Amino acid sequence: MSKFDRYDHRILQQLQTDNSVAVAELAEKIGLSTNACWRRIKRLQEQGIVRGNVALLDERKLGLDVTVFVSVKTSEHTDTWLEKFAKGIKAIPEVVEFYRMSGETDYLLKIVVQDINDYDRVYKKLISVAPMHDVSSSFAMERIKSSTALPLDHLVS
């Protein structure tokens, strides 16, 4: 892990909150010159710490009202099966997160769709990707917390 000082910490905190702020404004907020701030941002990007710059979209305003968490269990644990499964899942745009898990569930997917009928369409794609032992769906009733910001306090003392 890279060494971070309070300036890096402040830059990362700000970029997670509002990445549209001008470098000059960010530099002034954290007490650096514009050039020094820009160089630090570039270094963080080159190190892969800042992976990209994206717009966060509102699912509900786009008609994507249903979030589904899907637990997948498989009886096959081979590289070949995983390669086929991962390739198939990555090709389904409604799957916005995909994890290999420990414990009872082998894989966990987060799927965002318009409604239950739309989920059924996606479900049919999902089960055709590769043989699975069990697929279990849980529908989110309410989003209580959702954040893209990572905790950063451990980076500086």
Image (cartoon, helix red, strand yellow):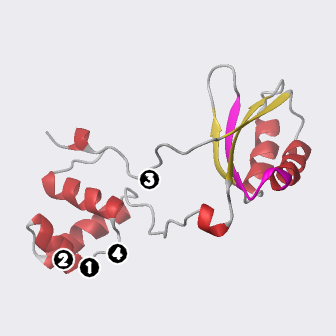
Q: Quadrant of residue 38?
A: bottom left
In the image, residue 57 lies at what x, y percent?
54, 67
Disc 4 to disc 2, C-alpha distance: 10 Å
Residue at position x 64%, y 68% in the image:
62
Say which residue label 1 marks: 22
The magenta-colored residue range is 106-117
Disc 4 to disc 3, C-alpha distance: 15 Å
Q: Nearer the viewer, residue 17 or 51?
A: 17
Q: N-terminal of the two: label 4 or label 2?
A: 4
Q: Is residue 129 left or right of residue 41?
A: right
**Label 4: how many Cα within 10 Å (few below 14, some 14–19, many 20+):** few
Amino acid type of disc 3? Thr
Say which residue label 2 marks: 25
Image vertical order of residue 27 relative to residue 111, above or below: below
Disc 4 to disc 1, C-alpha distance: 6 Å
Is disc 1 in contact with disc 3, using a CB cutoff of under 8 Å? no
Residue at position x 28%, y 45% in the image:
152
Q: Nearer the viewer, residue 35 or 98?
A: 98
Say which residue label 4 marks: 20
Disc 1 to disc 2, C-alpha distance: 5 Å
Disc 1 to disc 3, C-alpha distance: 20 Å
Image vertical order of residue 143 relative to residue 133, above or below: below
Question: Residue 148 — which label?
Answer: 3
Residue at position x 74%, y 59% in the image:
114
Image vertical order of residue 22 relative to residue 4, above or below: below
Amino acid type of disc 2? Glu
